[in-house]
Image (spheres, grey):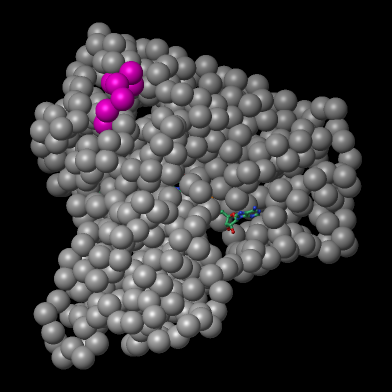
């Protein structure tokens, strides 16, 4: 007979789980002892806040496609997991949360740290069960992991700690530690109808998202044949190089003006692997074809004419065989010209030398030191827009909390990236607000010697909200954060800190930091200017004028955006 905890760790290994993020404590101590015995096979990464563990598990799944695992005690530890589990749910990736519980005989008695975990996890989890006997635990674990993969979300398995210590009575598991991915394929008739729509179209445009990761070659060959421009969702950043001649950049509030205009002019929208949520940025009356793995999402974002369910890596070449090739297309050429002008405009801004420093100059300095295959984990705020717009990707991978858009995801994402790929360069780009939500876990990077580089765009403000309030015509309230010396903090944690305040030392300090093999924070003091939308709408302009008038009468202050840029983006 084996200890149940030993069977659990054996199963984790069979599922190819080689690391777990967590914080030990009562109600999970028995499992911790089993994990101790397996430390060579399953690395335990002790984070300082369970939210970071859950966000790291979610990020690991986004990067690798493999399940991310986090662990916590009952009560407060479990509560801390929630944000990361919601991130996994909203971005549709598999995560397993192993959560301790008071011992079996105490469940339901208001015991110390006992909360109603089943009710708390009910909304977030795609699988939410509490083991009541040691016999069922291995099978519940298999079911939890399989469901997380099948339903692409977080599975929560709550276990009263005493169960791990019990001797397991059954000789054999009743279930198997396996998940088989289905091969879904649209019928030939639907593919032909989609090809017909494409052949009839004069101005086709592709909106590609994260689902294209792994199918970049197929996407480019298809787009090349029909001579269609490609615009990308935010999460599609990096699936094709930013400077590729068919790429019109990102789409939406964070996007480019050529992407917006080309989209509005198009007569056929080809959605590939995306849940792009901003209806205002899609054309009013275009025809549409959608290629999407999840049948539940076909037609969910646009009134499509044909939906092709399955893997775009297989479907794009099948479609490519049926569509007519084009040597040129004036619609594409028009926007390629506009895109050249956009790149010139962006590069010109990056080369300016404003005092104080601004975010585009930081991106320019970063671009010069970062490796072509680095992983870039970005936090939520203006920092997202600066990175996406001013940091061109060649072959880098992009990581963010997309749908939940939680601040504080940048650092956990970088931790997960370095754990998953110890030999790759990993960069986190965070705002001062987002980083302070999780900054305690910079010590984790020091403890585990994860040589990540954290760039902080330090504007002493929650810049995005300051700008949002202005855009709504409101006077700013509670958007100042106050000053913080993040470089000093990095050193106090045992890492390296670099503080950059002027253009003069930005390149040398950035290079120094990137040459180091230790975790480092590069704290850049920047001016808080607003990253204007790629395309400014009439309403945005009107509301902003209202803010300027109110601000003048109430605070006797005048804040003008960069008028040259505003005119270019109108
Ligand atoms: C500050 C901030 C600002 C933002 N602003 C914008 C913005 O302006 N523009 C923007 O686009 N987003 C923006 N977002 C992100 C936005 O909320 C969504 O997360 C994002 O648009 C979704 O991107 P996606 O569709 O590529 O990814 P997902 O939502 O992950 O969708 C990917 C889809 O691909 C499917 N799929 C997976 N694999 C395959 C395959 N092999 N074949 C076919 N289908 C597959 C999946 O089933 C899924 O439906 C912002 C987020 C933040 C934090
Ligand atoms: C957990 C969480 N709380 C609040 C928000 C709302 N929010 C979005 S961006 C932002 C400001 C981010 O500030 P900072 O990290 O300093 O980045 P900046 O915008 O200044 O570049 C806030 C408060 C959020 N997205 N997530
Ligand atoms: Mg800030």
Q: In which quarter of the image is residue 399?
A: top left
The answer to whether 561 appears left or right of 310 in the picture is left
Quadrant where the image shows the N terminus = bottom left
Number of callouts? 0
- Report x, y in % for residue 147: 51, 72
Q: In this view, which residue lies farthest toward the top?
A: 504
Residue 293 versus residue 112 in the image, above or below: above
Residue depicted at x 38% and y 39%: 418
Residue 186 versus residue 410 in the image, above or below: below
Viewer can see residue 489: no
In this view of the protein, which residue sits in the foreground, 41 or 189? 41
Residue 80 magenta-highlighted: no
In this view of the protein, which residue sits in the foreground, 46 or 437? 46
Residue 367 versus residue 171 in the image, above or below: above
Q: In this view, which residue lies farthest toward the front?
A: 1
The answer to whether 347 appears left or right of 455 in the picture is right
Viewer can see residue 77: yes
- Report x, y in % for residue 442: 22, 40
Residue depicted at x 24% and y 71%: 30
In this view of the protein, which residue sits in the foreground, 556 or 147? 147
Residue 136 versus residue 12 in the image, above or below: below
- Report x, y in % for residue 246: 67, 30
The span picked out in magenta is 513-519
Residue depicted at x 87% and y 56%: 192
- Report x, y in % for residue 79: 23, 68
Residue depicted at x 14% and y 76%: 113
The answer to whether 297 appears left or right of 356 in the picture is right
In this view of the protein, which residue sits in the foreground, 419 or 114? 419
């Amino acid at each position: 007979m084996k200890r149940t905890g030993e069977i659990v760790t054996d199963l984790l290994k069979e599922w190819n789980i080689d690391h777990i993020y967590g914080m030990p404590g009562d109600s999970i101590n028995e499992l911790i002892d089993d994990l101790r015995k397996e430390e060579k096979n399953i690395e335990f990464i002790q984070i300082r806040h369970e939210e970071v563990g859950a966000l790291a598990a979610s990020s690991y799944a986004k990067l690798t496609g493999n399940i991310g695992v986090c662990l916590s005690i009952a009560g407060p530890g479990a509560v801390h997991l929630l944000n990361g589990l919601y991130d996994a749910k909203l971005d549709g990736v598999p995560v397993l949360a192993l959560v301790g519980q008071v011992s079996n005989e105490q469940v339901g008695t208001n015991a110390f740290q006992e909360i109603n975990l089943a009710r708390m996890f009910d909304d977030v989890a795609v699988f939410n069960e509490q083991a009541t006997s040691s016999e069922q635990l291995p099978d519940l674990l298999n079911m939890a992991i399989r469901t997380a993969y099948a339903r692409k979300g977080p599975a929560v398995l709550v276990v009263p700690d005493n169960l791990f210590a019990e001797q397991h009575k059954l000789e054999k598991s009743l279930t198997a530690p396996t998940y088989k991915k289905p091969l879904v394929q649209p019928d030939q008739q639907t593919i032909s109808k989609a090809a017909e729509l494409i052949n009839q179209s004069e101005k086709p445009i592709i909106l590609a998202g994260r689902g294209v990761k792994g199918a970049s070659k197929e996407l480019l060959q298809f787009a090349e044949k029909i001579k269609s421009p490609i615009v990308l969702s935010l999460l599609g950043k990096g699936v094709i190089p930013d400077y590729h001649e068919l790429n019109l950049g990102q789409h939406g509030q964070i996007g480019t003006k050529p992407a917006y205009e080309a989209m509005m002019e198009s007569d056929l929208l080809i959605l590939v692997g995306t849940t792009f949520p901003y209806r205002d940025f899609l054309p009013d009356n275009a025809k549409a074809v959608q290629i999407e793995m999840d049948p539940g999402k076909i037609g969910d974002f646009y009134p499509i004419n044909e939906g092709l369910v399955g893997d775009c890596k297989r479907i794009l070449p099948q479609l490519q065989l049926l569509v007519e090739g084009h040597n040129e297309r004036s619609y594409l050429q028009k926007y390629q010209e506009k895109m050249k002008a956009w790149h010139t405009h962006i590069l010109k801004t990056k080369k300016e030398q404003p005092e104080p420093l601004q975010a585009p100059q930081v991106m320019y300095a970063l671009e010069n030191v970062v490796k072509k295959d680095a992983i870039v984990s970005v936090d939520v705020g203006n920092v997202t827009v600066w990175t996406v717009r001013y940091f061109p990707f060649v072959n880098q991978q992009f990581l963010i909390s997309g749908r939940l858009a939680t601040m504080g995801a940048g650092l956990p994402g970088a931790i997960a990236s370095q754990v998953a790929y110890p030999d790759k360069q990993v960069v986190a780009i965070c705002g001062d607000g987002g980083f302070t939500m999780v900054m305690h876990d910079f010590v984790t990077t020091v403890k585990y010697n994860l040589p990540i580089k954290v760039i902080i765009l330090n504007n002493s403000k929650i810049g995005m909200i300051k700008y949002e309030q202005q855009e709504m015509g409101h006077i700013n309230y509670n958007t100042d954060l106050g000053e913080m010396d993040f470089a000093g903090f990095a050193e106090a944690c045992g890492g390296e800190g670099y503080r950059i305040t002027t253009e003069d030392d930005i390149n040398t300090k950035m290079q120094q930091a990137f040459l180091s093999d230790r975790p480092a924070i590069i704290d850049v003091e920047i001016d808080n200017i607003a990253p204007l939308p790629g395309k400014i709408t009439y309403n945005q302009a009107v509301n902003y004028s209202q803010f300027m008038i109110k601000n003048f009468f109430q605070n006797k202050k005048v804040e003008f955006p960069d008028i040259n840029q505003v005119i270019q983006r109108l």
